[in-house]
Amino acid sequence: MPLVQVREKAQITIPSKIRKTLGIKEGDYLEVETEGNKIVLIPKILIDKAEAVTLSKEGEKMLKEALEDVKKGRIKKFKNAEELIDDLHK
């Protein structure tokens, strides 16, 4: 297990193997939490507010269309999640 040293201004360097595994690059954001006596770093993606609004509107439109499909009986029924996933991959 690699060790890191806390440097000036409380900075640490995340070992390259861990950065590569998680796809962390310079400029990325990490959420910092504690779990007991551990520090947990969680990679996060930030998006522009305008993009979030656009995605929200698209999601709302898709949800309305899906509800219409349910009302009109155009939705397939699946026995379990695996059956649904298999159908989505077709």
Image (spheres, rainbow, N blue to C red):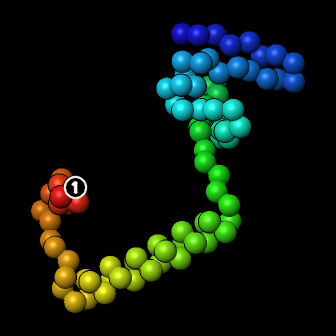
SS assignment at label 1: helix
Front in this rendered view, residue 36 or 74: 74
Find residue 64 and report its horizontal and vertical position in percent: 39, 83
Is residue 79 among what the camera can see? yes
Q: Which residue is mark 1?
A: 89
Q: Which residue corresponds to the image point at 40% horizontal and 76% vertical from the top-left?
A: 62
Q: Residues within 10 Å of mark 1 (few under 14, many from 20)?
A: few
Q: Which residue corresponds to the image point at 47% horizontal and 78% vertical from the top-left?
A: 60
Q: Is residue 67 left or right of residue 38?
A: left
Find residue 76 and report its horizontal and vertical position in percent: 16, 73
- Above or below residue 50? Residue 20 is above
Is residue 80 among what the camera can see? no
Q: What is the quadrant of the C terminus in the image?
A: bottom left
Find residue 26 and report its horizontal and vertical position in percent: 69, 32
- Above or below residue 28? Residue 88 is below
Front in this rendered view, residue 83 or 62: 62
- Above or below residue 3? Residue 30 is below
**Could you tell me the amino acid type at mark 1?**
His
